[in-house]
Amino acid sequence: MIGIGSDDLGFDVKERIRDFLVQREESVYDFGVYSIEPADYPDIGVKVAEAVRMGPVDCGVLVCGTGLGMAIAANKVPGVFAAPVSSVELAIAARRSNNAQIITLGSRIVSVDEACAIVGAWLATEFQEGASARKVAKVRAIDEHYRLARAQGTRSGQDEATVLCAARG
Ligand code: RB5
């Protein structure tokens, strides 16, 4: 299942992406927003990212004005890889190299047609494994490091950052 969501600025593009996916007979869950009433991107971004983390949806598409706020918000959810994309080329790379489960789009950056082409290309691409798998595993390890440190209440800095913090007092 594909989760979709937007803020008010992304609403029109999100609606068209939903139509595009339904036409392709994809299973879609729409996390809102459901109108152009003002809405804050983190409120929707976290819903889709959490659904990806928990598993009821396999992947997600988020739309805001630029695609940036949605990516930043979704990436705060542990285990989630959200990539802001503005072209078919980036969408393919986001899946092939980065194994992003979420892509984010900007309604001010891409047209509706471009958005649908981007989503279609992303869904048609598979993760290439190999060296990319090693790099993605390293990103997951960073995520896990901070999660564990927080859970244990220990200092969470890594290597140079810890030394720099200590030196600055
Ligand atoms: C509007 O809130 C705008 O900031 C939002 O749609 C998005 O572009 C944020 O990155």
Image (tube, grey):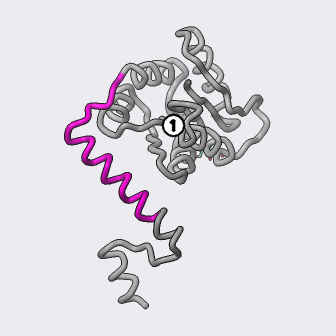
Can residue 97 be found in the magenta stretch? no
Outermost residue toward the left in this view: 131
Residue at 39% across, 30% down: 91
User: Of helix, strand and loop, which mostly describes the magenta segment?
Assistant: helix
Closer to the camera in the image, 114 or 146? 146
Is 101 on the left-hand or right-hand side of 17?
left
110 sits to left or right of 166: right
Q: In this view, does 123 lie above or below 9?
A: above
Q: Is residue 49 left or right of residue 31?
A: left
Relative image position of residue 136 (x, y in whole percent) = 32, 46
Amino acid type at mark 1: Thr
Q: Is mark 1 on a helix, strand or loop?
A: strand
Left or right relative to 31: residue 35? right
Where, quadrant-wise, is the C terminus in this rendering?
bottom left
Name which residue lies at 55% across and 36% down.
55
Question: Circle 1 sits on which residue?
Answer: 104
Which corner quadrant holds the N terminus?
top right
Is 141 one of the magenta-colored residues?
yes
Quadrant observed for ligand 1 in the rendered image: top right
- Residue, x 56% and y 14% (percent of image)? 20
How far across and how far down the image is residue 108, in percent? 56, 34
Which residue shows up at 43% across the image and 35% down it?
Answer: 85
Q: Is mark 1 within 8 Å of ligand 1?
A: no
Give the image location of residue 36, x and y in percent.
76, 32
Extent of the magenta region:
125-146
Question: Where residue 140 sits: x, y (%)?
Answer: 38, 52
